[in-house]
Amino acid sequence: MKDERDEILDQLFSTVRTIRLDTDAVGEHFETRLMARLQERRESWALWSAWAWRLVPWFSIFVIIVAASSVLIDPARSSDLFAEFTNGFDEYQVTSLIAGG
């Protein structure tokens, strides 16, 4: 009895293997679907880029105000442009030479 079931099952599997799947429906209008999806993505990014470009003047005004205030308000400003980079480095060198490190 088990052998008959196995034979029937094997026949069914072999029949199914011989049937070719119809994939033409998947390929129909593929380009149209692809272009529609790309258009949707473009529209979503267009909204963000439009807002970003609208805010650029406001951000640039903010940067100019901060730069001007840092130049005009800081009374202890050094005339040396590289003072901030070398500040304390000379002392560090002397200390390391004396300490032998």
Image (tube, rainbow, N blue to C red):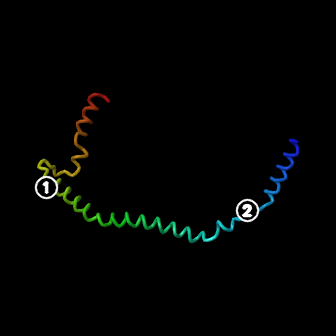
- How many angstroms separate mark 1 from mark 2 (CA)? 77 Å
**What quarter of the picture does the C terminus occupy?**
top left
Where does the image place residue 74, in percent across and percent down from the top left? 14, 50
Q: Is residue 17 above or below residue 51?
A: above
- The answer to which of 28 and 76 lies nearer the viewer is 28
**Residue type, mark 2 in image:** Leu
Q: Residues within 10 Å of mark 2 (few under 14, many from 20)?
A: few
Q: Is residue 35 above or below residue 65?
A: below
**Who's the residue at 20% across and 56% down the image?**
66
Question: Residue lying furthest top in this view?
Answer: 99
Query: What residue sits right under mark 2 in the picture?
Result: 21
**Who's the residue at 30% across and 66% down the image?**
54
**Who's the residue at 81% across and 59% down the image?**
18
Question: Residue lying furthest left in this view?
Answer: 75
- Report the side of 85 relative to 24 (left or right): left
The label number, if any, that marks residue 72 in the structure image = 1
